[in-house]
Amino acid sequence: MTNERFRLVAAVHLFLVRDGEVLLARRCNTGYGDGWYSVMAGHLEGVEEVQAAAMGEAREEAGVAIAPADLDLVGVMHRKEGDERIDFFLAAGRWSGEIANAEPHKCDELGWYGLDRLPEKTIPYVRRALDNYRRGVWFDSFGWREPDGARPAHP
């Protein structure tokens, strides 16, 4: 019998929003979801707080700075996609600097999309999280058995 505890992978996702639109990045050369759209995101490394991680992703991926007071925690998702994960979703409507693709080796397109008009190839759990945000749903589970017994589609 082992005393090692189960561990979850945790990630932070950032919704940069303006005028009913969200900034999406089309992934490339990452090995996950390439050719699909997502929001700024990254894994928690175990040495940073969720809000600080979101601020870091904004800087690393879009070249903008966000003040802690301008970040809102808008959702949490318990997700199963191979392994089990916890995703934190934060939103910001204010930042300083000009948005630019700061990681062209991982993203081949940045664009603003209506929250109700996302690209068809938006990563499914991200689409659901954005829909939850739009509807004010704070917690969700994704990737477990759906009510009809089917598994949701993933890229």
Image: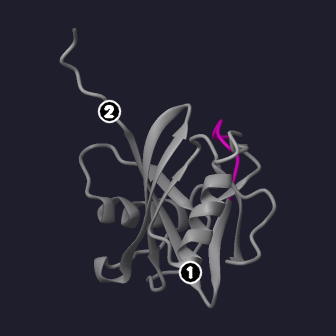
The stretch in magenta equals 26-33
Q: Quadrant of residue 4?
A: top left
Q: Position of residue 116 (x, y in %)?
A: 72, 78
Residue 103 left/right relative to 74: right
Quarter the C terminus occupies:
top right
Give the residue type that dot 1 points to: Val
- Residue 17 numbered tag: 1
Q: Quadrant of residue 17?
A: bottom right
Work out how far the residue at label 1 is from the one at label 2, CA to CA, in angstroms: 32 Å
The residue positioned farthest toward the left in the image shown = 3
Q: Position of residue 118 (x, y in %)?
A: 74, 70
Sequence-wise first label, 1 or 2: 2
Give the residue type that dot 2 points to: Arg
- Up-down: is 36 above or below 109? above
Residue 14 left/right relative to 107: left
- Up-down: is 149 above or below 19? above
The residue positioned farthest toward the front in the image shown = 148
27 in magenta: yes
Residue at image coords 46%, 66%: 58
Q: Which residue is identified by label 2? A: 7
- Up-down: is 70 above or below 109? below
The residue positioned farthest toward the bottom in the image shown = 19
Q: Position of residue 14 (x, y in %)?
A: 49, 66
Residue 17 left/right relative to 117: left
Residue at image coords 46%, 37%: 84
